[in-house]
Image (cartoon, rainbow, N blue to C red):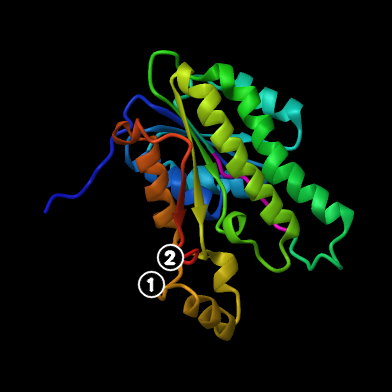
Amino acid sequence: MSQISFSFKDRHVLVTGGAQGIGFEIAKEFLRANALVTVADYNAEALDAAGKELKSFGTVQTCRLDVTDRSSCQKMAESLTKPLNVLINNAGITRDKSFAKMTEQDFDQVIQTNLTGLFNVTKALFEKFDANQPKRIINMASVVALYGNFGQTNYAAAKAGVVGMTKTWAKEFGRKGFTSNAVAPGFIRTKMTEAMPKEVLDGITAKVPVQRLGETSDIANACLFLASDQASYINGTVISVDGGLVL
């Protein structure tokens, strides 16, 4: 049986929050599919390390970016050396606390990064897309946007906003040659989850119908598909990559 493969030769993909975790895996898989990839991230040290590692997979550029700072977003947009084809809005943070303990700063920082930051980046890059090729926007939502989660008032609100923004853009941008979709990861195995106590991880896994955590590659594969020509008629949807958690 042949394997599904995607080619993004001569396509330019930009991944925010691409220096670590899910974003890093997304960048790596697009490089393997022959895309030119720009990795934008706030963490300068992680960005430098990611750039060095990703060079072994293909042509990669790196750019320091603070998604909450509109001037930083504009500077990043002006630095691009090639028109954009795919934007993956992946950058995000967490400041988890119960509502009673959550500070105004905890709430504001998550909203500014995970929701306003997505607006800032897309606004700065909107006119940088290649007019002659398909244009894709893929936003990183979350399973908690669809069913909520204790201790994540800020994060769930931001990611629910991402879903609404994605669907609105699908309606507005479709006539301009764009598709706008979102990916909603469930519990994904990253360095952060691997640091959790085994009993906590076992409890999380037990809630997932397929009885395992997701891998970063599961999210990257969804992004590859949504960015591909094969997904050209998928617009305004949210693909849950969660092992059935929201069922």
Whether residue 28 is visible to the viewer of this picture, yes or no, is: yes
Q: Main secondary structure of the magenta part?
A: loop
Three-letter amino acid code at the position of disc 2 = Gly
Task: Estimate the spatial distance between the alpha carbons at disc 1 and disc 2, rounded to whole Å.
Answer: 7 Å
Q: Is residue 87 left or right of residue 217?
A: right
Three-letter amino acid code at the position of disc 1 = Val
Asked if residue 59 is among those painted magenta in the image, a careful observer would answer no
Question: Residue furthest toward the left?
Answer: 1
Q: Range of the magenta residues?
A: 89-94
Q: Is 145 placed above or below 231 here?
A: below
Q: Is 114 placed above or below 206 here?
A: above
Q: Residue at x 61, y 50 (%)?
A: 46
Q: Is residue 169 left or right of residue 111?
A: left
Asked whether the residues under the numbered discs 1 and 2 touch, taking CB atoms below 8 Å apart as contact, a structural biologist would say yes
Which quadrant of the structure image shows residue 204?
A: bottom right
Q: Is 235 placed above or below 77 here?
A: below
Which residue in the structure is indicated by mark 2? 244
